[in-house]
Image: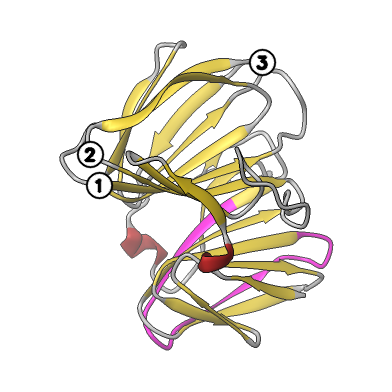
Amino acid sequence: MIELRPYESLGGENHGWLDAKHHFSFANYRDPNRTNWGALRVWNDDTIAPNTGFPPHPHRDMEIITYVREGAITHEDNLGNRGRTEAGDVQVMSAGSGVTHSEYNREGVTTKIFQIWIIPSESGGQPSWGAKPFPKGDRSGRFVTLASGVTGDTDALPIRTDARVLGATLKAGETAEYAIGAERRAYVVPAAGSVRIGEVTAQARDGVAIAGLEAFTVTALEDSEIVMVDAV
């Protein structure tokens, strides 16, 4: 199964400082057919105005991955962590037994992020935060694991769930194959460009839900930047 979820079909709300689009039910957006995709619970496409952001608020029992598409995001939490994550890089927060954090765009330009929430394999545990640069050149022509709870993914940021977050940059005409296994699910979003997966063509910020396949191939129709979640 390969299902296209066009950007225009997403839920969301424009708050002025924040223009948020939701691939799955979130906040005031409710769609019983789009509550999650396996353990993938949230994929928000957020555009944050300069010098604004999310004030301190709590979370628990969720793996929260932030992929910065443009600009930068500055994180602070009640554990004493503070960091600035730039475009193309990734931060992860394991909310565990509970954490309070803020995420601000302290730049003079608009920041655009994908915020991805994945349900953890177990509840509780000590909350944690981390960030890491992932140069786009290292992802040229192939998928690179950015965050993972799968054994053996030692170069990725750790998350506490049986899932991977991956990125790839493909030139027009290039392909990248991914062996997922029929028991798992993938959700693919081009951050930029356009791609073809099977008979489905996805434009920038469309979602593609994939299930029941041992493997699939992504073909770039133009220079593209791709983000994907592989989860149970």
Would residue 81 be seen by someone viewing this image from the given angle? Answer: yes
For the residue labelled by badge 3, is the local secondary structure a helix, a strand or a loop? Answer: loop
- Say which residue label 2 marks: 50
Label 1 to label 3: alpha-carbon separation: 32 Å
How would you rate the neighbour count of disc 2 (Cα within 10 Å): few for under 14, some for 14-19, many for 20 or more? some
Residue name at image x 25 percent, y 47 percent: 110
Residue at the (39%, 74%) spot, across then down:
193
The label number, if any, that marks residue 97 in the structure image: 3
Relative vertical location of residue 14 with respect to residue 122 in this rendering, above or below: below
CB of mark 1 within 8 Å of CB of mark 3?
A: no
* SS state under label 1: loop
Specify the segment rendered in magenta: 165-184
Q: Residue at x 59, y 55 (%)?
A: 23
In primary-sequence order, the first of circles 1 and 3 is 3
Residue 201, horizontal then vertical, whole percent: 55, 82
**Label disc, if present, on residue 110 of the rendered structure:** 1
Pick the front one: 154 or 66 = 66
Q: Position of residue 34 (x, y in %)?
A: 72, 55
Q: Residues within 10 Å of mark 1 (few under 14, many from 20)?
A: some
Horizontally, is 32 left or right of 88 in the view? Answer: right
